[in-house]
Amino acid sequence: MAAIGVHLGATCACAAVYKDGRADVVANDAGDRVTPAVVAFAENEEVVGLAAKQSRIRNISNTVVKVKQILGRSSDDPQAEKYIKESKCSVVEKNGKLHYEIDNKLISPEDVAKLIFSKMKALLAYGIGQDSPTGKSNVVVYKLGGTSLSITVIEVNSGIYRVLATNTDDGIGGVCFTEALAQHLASEFQRSCKHDIRGNPRAMMKLMNSADVAKHSLSTLGSANCFVDSLYDGLDFDCNVSRARFELICSSLFSKCVEAIKKLLEQVGFTAEDINKVVLCGGSARIPKLQQLIKDIFPNVELLSSIPPDEVIPIGAAIEAGILLGKENPSLEEEALFIECSAKDILLKGVDETGADKFTVLFPSGTPLPARRQHTLHAPGNTSSVCLELYESLGKSPMNEENKFAQIVLQDLDKKEDGLHDLLTVLTMKRDGSLHVTCTDQDTGKCEVITVEVAS
């Protein structure tokens, strides 16, 4: 019984197989270890992967890229709005759901994703030694697409293997770096040849291809040459881009990456000092400038990069599938192995600068147990007691008293005329779901402790 892992990213898809005590990525029919997450629709056929990417200049309006960015999103989602505006493939809404409009046919993003997963499944059939892609395997994968492809999905919570690899590719990944470079190249062409090609999809796609190659080269070289034969009106384009220039062009995108990391730390109640290892994940993690910015956030942390960044998630997923199947121990192969996870979001109620209620998610639903979180809560210094309230939620619905399940009160605090009370809250959730909470005033050391048992 095979254990496999699949990852669908914004630009590429990748699959790995766990066997003989290790996880290995399966190469595609071109010998590449990652496959472009691109689907081209032609008359009576769909083309997936490298061939679709290579033909998109000639078939741009019928070629779908970055489908992950609108999966499960509605038309009023800010990211979906941005995607629809920039997509060369027409995106329309019908019955409240987004669809691609291709040759007068409506195709859902889910169906596009399934075509990519089908391609991955065919590769995996070869990787696990099957003659055809119809057999069943056990796989850790995103839920979308998996259950319709004759694959037994044994774990659908991507948070499990993102413990091994957390990325920030939702709107910030390699495609955006490539687009930023392509826009710069278009400006250079306008300056030298007096033609603005930004409104020409075919010319811009040629620049995108050249920019993508240059971006990869700049991860290891100090400069890269961008040459496009007959870019526009018979004119060739030749431009050299230094790594320093690329970093300047993409400075705002680097800032977004840093903000995303800091936001993640805030959401889970961690500081940089709480982290001891960081796994670089996603193709853009190869960019030296981004690596340096991550090192600046975690100066005393080891950056793990022994696995190629765009292979980390599928390898982690395959290892997780192997664990769930008991392949770490042959005697467990036929037994079910479960990982306990928190069923709901656990939130701590506080107030913001304006005095309005503010909820901080400490344990997102799906957090593997046992787990520990800590959070510093600030309270007005002129108060002598503080009540901390814990809430639980299954979604993004507004919090109310019905969601509150516990509170802890710190009394007899020393009042401060200036400043704030710094209250350190440490929460530990055990495998059975019970929650142990410790709240300590950092100034006086006064402490209160409660334990919330699981309801029977």
Image: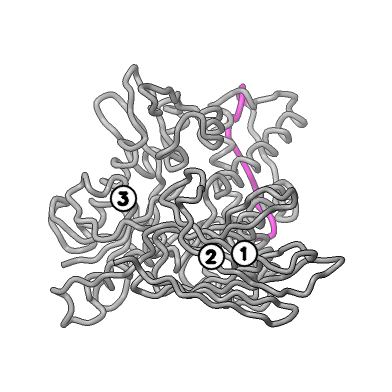
Task: Find out whether the residues at labels 1 and 2 contact each other: C-beta distance under 8 Å.
Answer: yes
Q: Going 38% across and 44% down the picture, which residue do you hit?
A: 50
Residue 204 located left or right of residue 255: left
Q: Residue at x 26, y 46 (%)?
A: 118
Query: Regarding mark 2 in the picture, which secondary structure is present there?
Result: strand
Instruction: Using the numbered discs, state the Cα–Cα distance from disc 1 to disc 3 in whole angstroms.
Output: 40 Å
Q: Residue at x 13, y 73 (%)?
A: 334
Residue 108, given in percent of the width and then of the height, sits at 34, 31
Task: Say few, some or many: other residues with alpha carbon within 10 Å of mark 2 (under 14 / 14 to 19 / 20 or more).
Answer: some
Mark 1 — residue?
387
Kind of residue at disc 2: Gln
Which circle's residue, 1 or 3, is located before the other in the chain? 3
What amino acid type should be assigned to the residue bearing mark 3? Lys
Tag 1: residue type? Cys
Labels 2 and 3: the sequence-earlier one: 3
The residue tagged with tag 1: helix, strand or loop?
A: strand
The magenta region covers: 221-234
Q: How many marks?
A: 3
Q: Is residue 275 magenta?
A: no
Mark 1 to mark 2: distance in Å? Answer: 7 Å
